[in-house]
Image (spheres, rainbow, N blue to C red):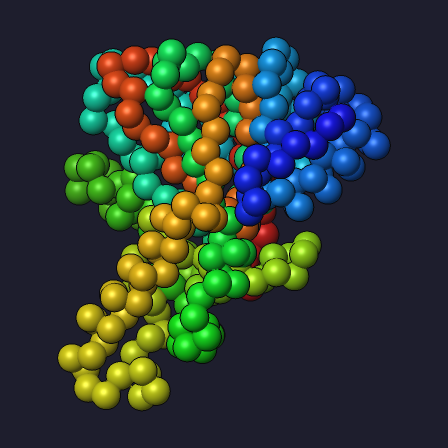
């Protein structure tokens, strides 16, 4: 296996490896996992394996989770089908910078995403290094967000376009989760900026240290949150991947955000994703 970094900050392509082999090859899997921790997102071409092998490889990282809105393959629970077609011109929930499912109490460890069908051009995906985003924050901002916590909501994102009854039922099933604004990576110990498109507000901002009067609370908190979310937009933290059939991306959801570029309608784009259950951020 050859590891070829794609940028100076994030992403590497694995060459000369078949992920199906890593299902039973402990040494190969250990190399892939180590590369994932180092580069945060890994890319491979020409991975023509069966859905069962896709699931089996992803399960080497941990148990898989379904998604309450995107449907799973009926024969392979945990293999979520992200299928876009010309009949869905307004289905654009992916094109925002986000870490997957941070509205869960325990967001995913990471994901293994495979391209089944893609447009001849367009439909790329970008990833951002949120460890680097935190490291490069000004010192006074790091002090300001130390100890801050924030809410993450499926209701305000996936549920926003639903009729009110369905939206409230979704929130009842998945109440807003609360996470630290800066989480610690459980394997590397790195500090990670952990707010994204699912984040709605800080939960402990309004304190005497931050707010002179109540009027300070809303604009002060929202301006700070918007500034933090915008750090993923910085090109120096990003890698962009052009999909081809049977291309695969594996990413560490704990230390990255990603953005699926919706520039391809009216074409069809079919992706299949296995998300690995993660731990509670701290």
Give the answer, above or below, for where 32 lies relative to 106: above
In the rendered image, the quadrant that contains the N terminus is top right
Which residue is found at the position 30% from the left and 79% from the top?
Answer: 206
Percent position of residue 28, x then y:
79, 29
- 222 vs 56, left or right, is left
- Residue 275 occupies which quadrant of the picture? top right
Give the answer, above or below, for where 137 lies relative to 207: above
Percent position of residue 66, x then y:
49, 33
Which residue is found at the position 36% from the left and 74% from the top?
Answer: 204
Which residue is found at the position 73% from the left and 28% from the top?
Answer: 2
- Residue 59 occupies which quadrant of the picture? top right
Percent position of residue 91, x then y:
25, 27
Judge whether residue 267 can be spotted in this image.
yes
Judge whether residue 277 can be spotted in this image.
no
Which residue is found at the position 47% from the left and 48% from the top?
Answer: 237
- 272 vs 95, left or right, is right
Q: How many marks?
A: 0
Percent position of residue 47, x then y:
62, 16
Give the answer, above or below, for where 178 lies relative to 43: below
- 84 vs 143, left or right, is left
The answer to which of 137 and 96 lies nearer the viewer is 137
The answer to which of 123 and 203 lies nearer the viewer is 123
In the rendered image, the quadrant that contains the C terminus is bottom right
The answer to which of 153 and 68 lies nearer the viewer is 153
């Amino acid at each position: 296996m050859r590891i070829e970094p794609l940028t100076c900050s994030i992403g590497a392509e694995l060459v000369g490896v078949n992920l199906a082999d890593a299902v039973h090859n402990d040494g190969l899997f250990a190399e892939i996992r180590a590369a994932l921790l180092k580069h945060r997102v890994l890319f491979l071409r020409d991975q023509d394996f069966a859905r069962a092998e896709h699931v089996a490889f992803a399960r080497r990282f941990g148990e898989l989770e379904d998604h309450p809105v995107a449907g799973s393959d009926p024969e392979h629970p945990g293999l979520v089908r992200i299928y876009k077609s010309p009949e869905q011109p307004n289905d654009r929930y992916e094109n925002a910078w986000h870490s997957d499912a941070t509205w869960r109490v325990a967001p995913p460890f990471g994901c293994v995403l495979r391209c089944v069908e893609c447009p001849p051009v367009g439909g790329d995906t970008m990833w951002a290094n949120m460890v680097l985003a935190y490291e490069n924050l000004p010192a006074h901002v790091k002090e300001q967000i130390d100890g801050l916590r924030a809410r993450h909501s499926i209701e305000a994102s996936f549920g926003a376009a639903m009729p009110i009854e369905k939206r409230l039922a979704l929130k009842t099933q998945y109440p807003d989760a609360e996470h630290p604004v800066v989480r610690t990576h459980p394997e590397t110990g790195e500090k990670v900026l952990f707010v994204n498109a699912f984040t709605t507000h800080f939960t402990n901002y309004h304190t005497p240290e931050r707010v002179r009067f109540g009027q300070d609370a809303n604009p002060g908190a929202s301006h700070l949150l918007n500034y933090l979310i915008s750090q993923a937009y910085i090109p120096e933290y990003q890698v962009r991947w052009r999909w081809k059939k049977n291309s695969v991306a594996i990413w560490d959801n704990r230390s990255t955000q990603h953005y699926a570029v919706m520039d391809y309608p009216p074409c069809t784009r079919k992706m299949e994703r296995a998300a690995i259950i993660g731990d509670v951020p701290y």
